[in-house]
Structures are given as C-alpha cells and as structure tokens.
Image (cartoon, rainbow, N blue to C red):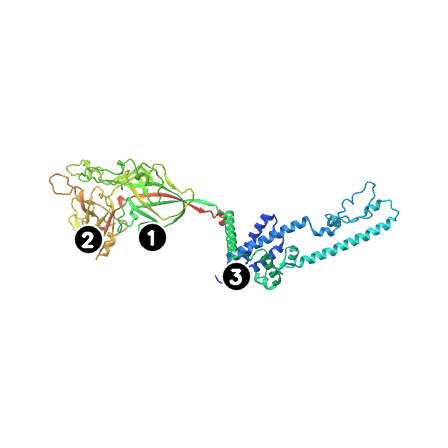
Amino acid sequence: MENQDIKNLYFSTNNSSFTYDLVRKDVQRKTSYDIIKNKNFKTNYEKMAVSVYNNLDNDNRNLVTLNNTLIEKSTAYFIKLINEKKNKSNQSNVNTYMPQPISTLLQPKQNNNPLPFTLSDEFLNDVETVSQPIYNNMETLNSNDSKDPMVLMEQERINRENQFNEFNEQFKKQKQKSLQPSFNEDNNADFSIGRDDALVNTIVDSVNVDPLDLYRKNEEIENRMLHSMTNNNISQTNNELENSISNSLNKISKDYITNNQPVYLEKEHFISVNSIDRDWTATSETRYNFKVNFDADSQYGVTISTAYKNVISVELINVYIPQDPIIVPFDNRLYLDALHYPYLLLEIDELDGVFRGSNTALENSFSQLIFDKEHSSQVLSDDFVGSDSEPAPDLRFQKQYQRGYYRFIPSFFEKKQYYNAPLSSLRSMSIKINNPEGDLLNTQKDVIKISAIADEQIADREIKTTMGFPNTDCSSNYNQYIKITTTNHFFNKQFKIGDKIKISGVESDNTTLDTFLNRNEGHHIINLVEEDITANTNVNKSSINIIYISPKGSLSDTNNNLNTSTYNDVDGASFTATGTLINVSLQTNLLFKVVTREVDVKSVTKPQNI
C-alpha cells in the first residue's frame, strides 16, 4: 500500500473513532474517568495522531504501527494527566491564596451577636472549601476593646478587599503560568503542569475539518506535543518499540475476540451416498470399497457438491446392502449372503478412533452394523419356473428370482464426535463394508467389459420365450433379443433375470442405437443362458457370459401392435467400441448425518414474520 493510501486510511474518520474508543475504554478502566465528557481530550488526541505520523519513519508507517503507537502513547498521557488532576484537587496550590472557610462564622454565637453583614450563596459556594478565614481578627468584634466598632468593621473590610485582590493576582499568575510550558534541561517543553488549562487554547473544530489540516493550523501545538511524547519515551529503541507495538496489538486482538464472541448454531446435514455414482468405468473401486469426495470441483468418483466446515460430529444413520450372494467355488447349490453374518463392519479411514475392540478389524471400524429390515420382491411367479410338464417350482430357484435389499443400522448409534474443537473441514470419506473378519463383504465384480453386441431370435433360455410382442408372428424379425456377450464370465446368482444394468461407452455407426444402449435409465435383464447342472454334460454350471435385453421399440396406442417405426435392433450395426456394463441392482447406499457449527446471524439479519 502506498504512503498516501496509508496516510488517508490512518487519518480517516472511521479509524480515528475506532482507536479513540479503545483509548477511552482503557483510560476509563484505569482511572474511572470517561474522557468523552471533555471534548478537549478528543481535540488533543487528533493532534497527537498527527505528531505520531510525522515522528515515525517511512519504514514504520504502516496502519498497525501507527495505530498501536498512537493508542499506547495517548493512553499513557491521558492517564497521567487525569491522575495529576486528581492529586491537584486534593492539595491545590491555589488554596494557599484563598481565605479560610467562614462556615463556622455563619453560625450564631452563644451571645447571639449576628454578623455585621450577610454573604450571598454564590460567594459561600466559591469560598467554602478554602482553608483560611476571611476575618483573621473577627474575635475583636466581641472584645471589650475601647475602639469604635465601626472603625474596626471598616478596617476589616479593607483587609478583606486586600486579601481578595491578592488572591485574584495570584490566580491570574497561576493561570498564565499554566498556559506557558516550562522547559527542561534539553530545552524541551514540559506539559506536566497545567495541562488541562493548556487544552483550552488547543480547541479545534474537527467535525468538518480534514485531520491533515490540523498539522498546518497547529504547528506549534504539534511540536510541543511531540516533545511531550518524546519525554514519555516515544523515542525508544527499535526493538523496544517493536515489542511494545506487538504487545499492544496482541492485547487489542485478544480483547476484541473476548468481547465479541459470536453466537453459534449447530446445523444438521443429511448425506446420501450411492456406490453406483462412483467412476465405475475407469477405476477399480467396487460397491463395497469406494471413496466419497466433498469437493464441488471434483469430476471423478462419488462427489458431494457441498464442502462441510467446522464439523462437530459425523454419524451413520443406515446402510442398504443388496441381496448379494457370496459365491462358494465348485458348489453352486449354496446361497450365502450378508444375513449369515452376525454383524458387518463399516470402516472409514478419515474417521477413525470411534471403536475399541479385541482385533484389528474392530479397532479400525467406524460402526458395527446389525440387520434391521428386508426389502425384496419376487421377480417371477412360481408358475413360470420349471417346465410345462413340471409346473411345481424348482427349489433351487428359491432365491434365484428374488431381488431386494437388507437394511442395516448402527448397533450402538455410534458417531465420530469432535469434542474440543470442530474439524476444520471434511474433505473425503473412504468407505469399506467388511465382514466380521475385516475382509470386504463380497469380492465378485459388479462391472464387466462387453466383448460383443448382436441380435438373436427369441428362443427358450433360462426362462421360456417371451410372448410379449402382441399381434406379431414370433418367427418374424421383429421378435429378437439384443444379445450382450461379456469378456469375463459371471455367476447367474449375481446377475439375475430382472436386474437392472447400465451400459456406457458403446459407439457404432448407428447413433440412434448408441443413444438407446447408453441411456441413463439402463436396461433390465430379461433372460439368461440356461443353466445345466446334470452330470456328464459339457455345459455351464451357473458361470455364464451372455445377457439378453429388450430391443428398442414401443407399442402402438391404436391397435396395441408393435410400433415398427420405433423398433431398432442391432442388425447391421458396426461397432467401434462395445463399452462396459454395471449391475445397478447390486449397489450399496449409505445415509450419514453431519453436524456443523455455524455463526448465528439472527442479530444481524433481524428476521421478521410476515
């Protein structure tokens, strides 16, 4: 900042009022006197401000140094001035020139002799505090002297007039002396005597005057003030001055913070996190192991647009776990999922220290999850499971055509609490859902690369051929599946009929088809390759790599036929990229409550009910 800018800011009305208020409070606290009662203090304060600015060199002419020097020196000066005034009130030199009080003389004597004259109330108030009587020989009025009483009275009147004349002369000399400073051995003006009277001649109307004009109009007063401040050690060494300024600044900051503590509110925020929102096309994250970023600028992974600051606590409300079977190699009859564990463990690296346990898995846990509710539905009626000759359901499909979720909740309503000081900011959460041993709940992939996309005539697969094309010959070209072949095999207990999948990254010479396949609402699996677990056959044993979905098209509203103008299959399309798919029905969802501390602005905004 340029010197002129600092100068303008230093002499501004706001800065002057702010620093003077600090001086006023400090002086009042130490002397019990409010300097605002006397406008002379304010006038001299403005002159001292000019003196401080001109006395400091250019290297120290910054706003902090100027303000702190001015506050320190003016406070010390005002306190000294007020204390001297109090001492002078107790033992004033003026008293030696005033007669003694006559209050006792106003009382009638025992012989009931009245005074020869009466005194006005105003005069009594003026002389009541003096120490000498007006009539030093008043007792002669009651003596048996042979002199004429009228002569004695005249003599006393003359003496009284002489005493008052002497007092007036002495008072004028004392006042004149107070207006002229004494000089010390260094020929510097000393204002330690009569400082209040000196203030009378320094009154300048500063309401409508630029503070810079004070210097030009009062150069003599400014020089005297500079000498006075020099005598008060303003010209101390650089180290002492720097320490003094630093201490004053720290004290001002401390007092301001102490006296202006804001009122805080605790605000609750609910955060819902879904594993489907991770960057599943480019990362190796899974539905049970992914990271949440609290950064509005982040373009990757699960992102919460709001950054939370001054966090008091983070608490888990619930977790939804899919009916996700745990595959046991070489035996596809077993159907195990999250319910065969007594509890699950939620681990969040950024929020540790909540649990204490007997093993590492428990020590690293943020929450211990227990089963609460099940939300599921039957995909197919039992009548459609099995062959025509065997309408009874095949028991091995007991859960094959069920899909849903399990709701888990914290067993002890545990949460991460920041007791001593709020967490400055919550930047991320690394989510891991583990089994009681500390391993991920399921390691089977929910994301698969696509190797080929084609069409195929509808035929019996795991379930029979669909008859859902009304008024259409099932042998026609309008009765075809879209056949998706994946690079890696998957288990038909995880990718089930009725599951929803999303496809991303498909590119071909048919843009309409690309838009349909890559649509955000995804597709449902309507059939899978038939499983054959009989002996001595070289067929799949629940591990497959083909998925069937419906082609693009809609039904006509007029005759309930297939609207052939909307139909679009894969026939003839040339693919340059086949993309990736994810099983939406296998995703997890977590709900958190974050409590933050925020400043209550009610006193500033002053809301009103309308």
The percent position of residue 31, horizontal first and vertical second, equals 60, 48
Q: Quadrant of residue 144?
A: top right
Q: Is residue 161 visible?
A: yes
Left or right: residue 259 compared with residue 360: right
Q: Which residue is mark 3?
A: 57
x and y, in percent, of residue 467 in the image = 19, 45
Viewer-nearest of labels 2 and 1?
Answer: 1
> Residue 288 location, x and y as percent?
28, 44
Disc 2, disc 1: CB below 8 Å? no
Among the two numbered marks 2 and 1 on one chain, the one whose residue lies closer to the N terminus = 1
Sequence order check, earlier mark of 3 and 2: 3
Would you name the residue on which mark 1 appears? 298
SS assignment at label 2:
loop
- Could you give the CA–CA distance between mark 2 and mark 1, rounded to whole angstroms? 36 Å
Q: Which SS class for mark 3?
A: loop
| Amino acid at dot 1 | Ser
Cβ–Cβ under 8 Å for marks 3 and 2: no
Residue at point 77%, 55% (across, down):
165
Three-letter amino acid code of the residue under disc 3:
Asp
Q: Nearer the viewer, residue 302 or 432?
A: 432
- In the image: residue 118, left or right of residue 9: right
Q: Nearer the viewer, residue 127 or 446?
A: 127
Determine which residue is flagged by label 2.
Answer: 570
